[in-house]
Amino acid sequence: MNTLPVILVIEDDAAMRVLLERGLAAEGYSVRAVDNGVDALIAAQGETVDGAVVDVMLPGMSGFEFSRRIREAGETFPVLLLTARDAVEDRVFGLDSGADDYLTKPFDFAELSARVRAMLRRHAGGDRLRLGVGQLLL
């Protein structure tokens, strides 16, 4: 049984996709990678996903549109948009489209990894129910 968090990587550039896949796998994630927005939407709605790293400029559907559509579908997993588009308007539009974070290229992988960890912590914290009796905590 796979208990590793599943990260959906959506990146059309093959070299960048492999870099993200390898790096995230080395950080202890199970990685599912696709190269376009349409396949990403299908994967996000048909599989268990704990978080997503999404390029903005994708064939078939932009990362902005992907974020908007998964939120409309009721998906709550965190989304990090990854893009060379660094204008304030793009960052605001991305976050307003449903993304949880926005990181511009070029980036340091250590920062991307830290942002993924932070997103997953915030997301997991909201879904946990804790019950305690004495020193027993469930």
Image: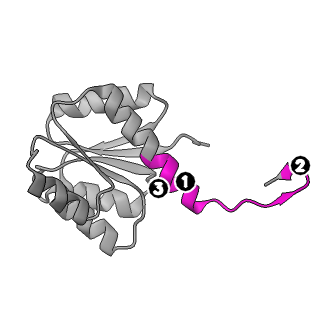
Instruction: Give whichever of discs 1 and 2 has the lower sequence position.
Output: 1
The image position of residue 51, as x and y in percent, is 40, 50
The image position of residue 102, as x and y in percent, is 25, 48
Dot 2 and dot 3 residues touching (CB under 8 Å): no
Q: Callout 3 environment at 10 Å: few (<14), some (14 to 19), or many (20+)?
A: few
Q: Which residues are magenta?
A: 119-136
Instruction: Give whichever of discs 3 and 1 has the lower sequence position.
Output: 3
**Quarter location, residue 85:** top left
Residue type of the residue flagged with mark 2: Gln
Answer above or below: position of 137 versus 82. Answer: below
Spatial CA span between label 2 and label 3 = 33 Å
Q: Which mark is residue 135?
A: 2
Q: Callout 1 environment at 10 Å: few (<14), some (14 to 19), or many (20+)?
A: few
Spatial CA span between label 1 and label 2 = 22 Å
In this view, the residue in front, 87 or 75, is 87
**Circle 1 — which element?**
helix
The image position of residue 112, as x and y in percent, is 32, 34
Instruction: Give whichever of discs 2 and 3 has the lower sequence position.
Output: 3
Residue under label 3, please give it.
48
Q: Which mark is residue 95?
A: none
Q: Is residue 78 left or right of residue 127?
A: left
Answer above or below: position of 1 versus 79. Answer: above
Residue type of the residue flagged with mark 3: Thr
Residue type of the residue flagged with mark 1: Ala
Residue under label 1, please give it.
124
The image position of residue 72, as x and y in percent, is 31, 74
**Quarter location, residue 2:** top right
